[in-house]
Amino acid sequence: MIIKHAILHILDKDAGNLIASQNEMDISNIQVHEYLEGILVKFENGDYKPGQLQDSDYIAQMISDDNPASFVEKTTTLADKLFSIIAPSEQIPAGDIVCVEYSAGTEDFFALLKLNLVPHYTHTIDYEGDDLVNKLVLNKAILPDPTQTAQEGILINLMTGAFQLVEKQYLIDGHRVNYFSQQFLEINPETSAKDNLKSIKNTVKHVAEKFDVPEHEALSSAQSAIFKNLQDNEGSINISDIGDAVFEGNMTAKTAYQEVAKEQNLEDSIEIPNAAKYEKKYQTQRFKLDSGIEITIPMDVYQDKNKVEFVNNPDGTQTLLLKDIGAIMNKFNS
């Protein structure tokens, strides 16, 4: 990663001021470079809403090469607008806004991240009379660790206009809104992979309940189908494949699934950015029994009935059979 420009503006809501930096950060400082690279890489690999900028979009015009303003001037204008939005709201936390322009491979990017401040204790040296006293103080202006994902921000590919957006809803004028995209950036992102997967889960649960399919069976079948789709379709999910797998042999349930999926605004095919992350997440099945027992089963083992089997008992209970066990190890954590 080659960082070309970087600047930090302080959104000091407590003091009621935007403290805009008049110069860029010293990116030759290795610690500054490592911090910025850390938060950017973490942001790139997190859950986000994808989208495509249009030339007429506010943020596209602001960062365009056709805008004669300098990097400092552009980012100060953005920071001023963001501060004017969050200042009246008690719900939206204060923070710092970091703007970075950088290259990765053959592509150029612009990132704007709002870093919410984290309170942490530190030490201070004081004197009581002639005595030196070491004390604890609460510093409320600590930036998040570079291993933490920024809760709000946008990353824009300057070559293609494609963007990644992360945001949170906050209460403004009595309504929960996505102020970061709607009021600040003035763009309409697509649905995130996380929200799409949540909609698939809700659709499966709703239809399973309607057709008396045990929830754990329906959800485990859905997870298996999603995992297979991600592997076979290079990071995309075919919505009908999930319904076919979960409600195999029940055409009425499959039809109901398709209808509910449309109500959930699910497209026929969903692209999953950072698919490897979800493949890793879904490569194990996790169950929690009413007895309090929790079980984690690798996907390939779960799909082998010679290894794992759920048996329905006449009294309505179920038995989980774990077969062909060669050895047992205790995972005692000291």
Image (tube, helix red, strand yellow):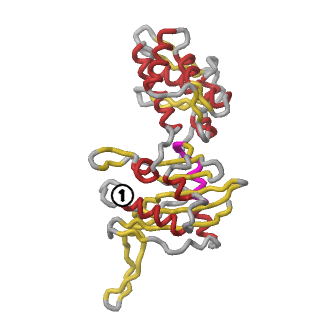
Q: Is residue 295 left or right of residue 120?
A: right
What kind of element bears circle 1? helix
In the rendering, at what x and y percent does residue 191 appear? Answer: 49, 37
Q: Residue at x 32, y 54 (%)?
A: 91
Q: Is residue 175 visible?
A: yes
Identify the image quadrant of the N terminus. Answer: bottom right
Give the residues drawn in magenta, as a range: 37-50
Residue 119: percent from left, percent from top: 39, 63
Q: Going by the picture, which residue comes out furthest to the bottom? A: 130
Number of numbered discs on residues: 1
Quarter of image, res 129 = bottom left
On screen, residue 44 above or below 298: below
In this rendering, the answer to whether 278 lies above or below 2 is: above
Image quadrant where residue 13 sits: bottom left
Q: Which residue is painted at 35% across and 88% down in the image?
A: 131
Query: Who's the residue at 47% across and 12% down the image?
Result: 253
Q: Disc 1 designates what residue?
A: 86
Q: Is residue 149 visible?
A: no
In the image, farthest residue toward the right: 106
Judged left or right of residue 275, residue 115 is left
Name which residue type carries label 1: Ile
Judging depth in this view, the residue of 78 and 169 nearest the camera is 78
Left or right of 155: which side holds 202? left
Image position, residue 2 (x, y; %): 68, 62
Q: Residue furthest left?
A: 174
Q: Nearer the viewer, residue 67 or 230?
A: 67
Asked if residue 145 is among those painted magenta in the image, a careful observer would answer: no
Tell me where residue 41 sits by quadrant.
bottom right
Vertical placement of residue 220 versus 2, above or below: above
| Label 1 environment density (alpha carbons within 10 Å; few <14, some 14–19, many ≥20) | many
Q: Position of residue 115 (x, y in %)?
A: 47, 59
